[in-house]
Image: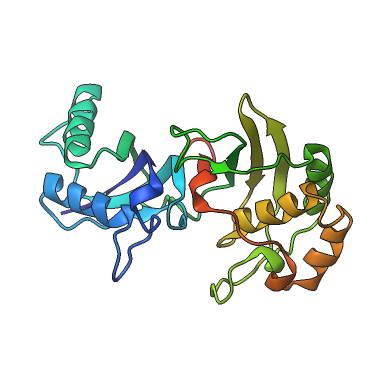
Amino acid sequence: MATQRFFLELAYDGTNYHGWQLQPNAIGVQEVLNKALSTILREPIETLGCGRTDTGVHAKQFFAHFDAEQPIDHGPWSIEKKNNFLRSLNALLPHDIAVGSIFEVNSDDHARFDATLRSYEYHIHFNKDPFKYGYSWLLRDEPDIELMNQAAKIIMGYTDFSCFSKSNTQVKTNNCKISKAEWAKTDSGIVFHISADRFLRNMVRAIVGTLIQVGKKEIEPADIHVIIRSKNRSKAGTSVPACGLYLTEVVYPSPL
């Protein structure tokens, strides 16, 4: 029988998972979602995500696609049938994974390769708060946000981010086009907003760690030029904890 391709929009709390990707000796979000879909559709289902997130990283918006026989008996897929499917799927999924929508797409639409923009946020707070534990990084001293924004503007002028990439990632290129990189104050701390066409593994956490060095006045904003041109990961700052990082938006051409 012919198969149909579907896109899922989901969100997850990454605390209990080793990222999105299937892991040989650990649980990833992808594995849990595959099992739930396979149970409902009564056939082996393999999803493919819009990217991969590191262990402990959260996603407010994430997309995945899969191929399957249409999960209906006959006729068009009504809103009621979609809602029933989502209710059944969410009932099987644990509390920290939620699917918000599902829609049919063309057979060659791709959750990863068709995405044109991805956005992340990194949250930092300065006073101990039990309700932020695991969802924001507690930093003792407040850094200089103006200096960090000066450095963030410098980063936007480059495309090769080898210095912020995890080693041995086996990607074809370390080039990314960053369209937004800025810090903003919140009621209890600060948040870093960054958007790009693609990201390297560990890239956002390494950028944040380097910008925090600028904010602490351990290095100057202009030192960012030297760090990026070095293409050497050891020249950049330490990666910040995963708990404060969220994938917040994934953009596709319209319509898919």
Q: Is residue 33 above or below residue 224?
A: above
Q: Is residue 47 visible?
A: no
Q: Is residue 205 left or right of residue 219?
A: left
Asked where in the image residue 31 lies, by quadrant, the reply is bottom left
Foreground: 78 or 131? 131
- Identify the residue shown where x is 58% and y is 34%: 127
**Residue nearer the viewer, 85 or 145:** 145
Q: Is residue 167 above or below residue 149?
A: below
Q: Name the residue located 50 percent from the left edge and 33 percent from the top edge.
A: 129
Q: Position of residue 230 (x, y in %)?
A: 80, 72
Q: Quadrant of residue 234?
A: bottom right
**Residue toward you, 204 or 125:** 125
Q: Is residue 47 shown left or right of residue 245? A: left
How was the colour assigned to the protein in this rendering? Answer: rainbow
**Which quadrant, please, contains the N terminus?**
bottom left
| Residue drawn 77% across the image and 38% down it | 145
What is the tally of numbered marks visible in this picture? 0
In this rendering, does residue 95 appear at all?
A: yes
Relative to 132, is 81 on the left or the right?
A: left
- In the rendered structure, the answer to whether residue 159 lies left or right of residue 206 reads right
Residue sitting at x 19%, y 33%: 85
- Return the x and y of residue 72 as percentages of the image width and height: 14, 36
